Amino acid sequence: MRRVVALALLIGFCCNARSSVAENEGQWERIADTSPNKKFAMRILCKSEPDDPERIDPDSITAVQLISLPSKNVLVTDLGQSMEGSPPGKLLWAQDSHWFAFALSQGHRVTETSVYHQNGDKFEAIDTENLRVEAGGDPRNQYIEPIRWIKPGTLLLEQFTIFMYGKGESKFQFSVRFDASGKIHVVSKKKLKSDGDE
C-alpha cells in the first residue's frame, strides 16, 4: 500500500512539474533590474522573442514578476503591466535590497508607484493609495514616479499634475518614510518649476 501511495505522489509531482514547465514553454524571458545583493530581479515573460530585446512590444508581454536568483523562484507573481502600449516600468531597489519601488502607467493619464518590502522570504506590497502630495488643484492627469531611495525605507518621488479645465500644472519632489506598519509619512515636499512656468 505504501508503494502505491508513494508511486501516486511521484506521478502527481512529475505531472505538476511538467505543467509548470509547459506554462513557460515557447515563452521568451528577460531578466532585468537585479537587486544590489544580486539575489532578486524582475522577469518579463513574452509570447516570443522580440526583434529588439531593449524595445519589447508591450502586447507580447504575458507576465512581469519578481524572482529570486539564481533559482528563478517567483516571489511576486504579477507586478502589473503598463497600459496604453507602454513597456513595463523600471524597478528601483533600495541599497539594502529589502525594498523596491515600481512605477506603473495606468493609462495615458495616470502613473502610480508601487512599493514592496521584504518580509522573511517574501516581498509584500505596501498600501500606496495615499502616496502623493496635495497638488493644489483638481487633477486631470497625474504621474507619480520614484527617483531614488534616500535610505532603506525612505523614498524620493516626483509628482507631475495637469489640472482640469486648462488650469495649469504643478510639479513636486517629495520624500516619504514607511514605518514598521507600512504607514506613509511625508518627510519633505518641494515645488519644482514646471515647463509651463514663466
Image (cartoon, rainbow, N blue to C red):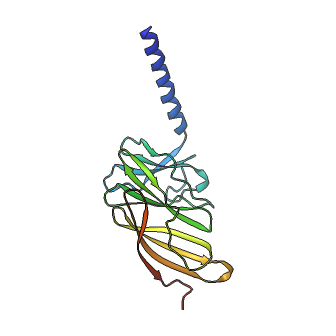
In the rendered picture of this protein, how many numbered marks are placed on residues?
A: 0
Image quarter where the N terminus lies is: top left
Expressed as whole percent of the image width and height from the top left, the position of residue 15 reads 51, 25
Is the residue 50 above or below the residue 13 in the image? Answer: below
Identified at 35% across, 60% down, the residue is 94
Residue 116 % position (x, y): 43, 55
Q: Nearer the viewer, residue 30 or 8?
A: 8
Q: Looking at the picture, does residue 151 appear above or below residue 19?
A: below
Left or right placement of residue 118 versus residue 83 in this view: left
Identity of the residue furthest to the bottom in this view: 198
Residue 30 spot, x, y in % from top left? 47, 50
188 to the left or right of 54 = left
Q: Position of residue 98 (x, y in %)?
A: 35, 54
At a point 46% along the width and 14% down the height, the residue shown is 5
- Quarter of the figure with residue 140: bottom right
Can you say whether 181 is above or below 133 in the image?
Answer: above
Q: Residue furthest right?
A: 165
Q: Quadrant of the C terminus?
A: bottom right
Q: Is residue 27 above or below residue 34?
A: above
Q: Nearer the viewer, residue 90 or 134?
A: 134
Residue at coordinates 54% horizontally, 56% vertically from top-left? 56
Instruction: Describe residue 164's horizontal placement relative to residue 188 as left or right.
Output: right
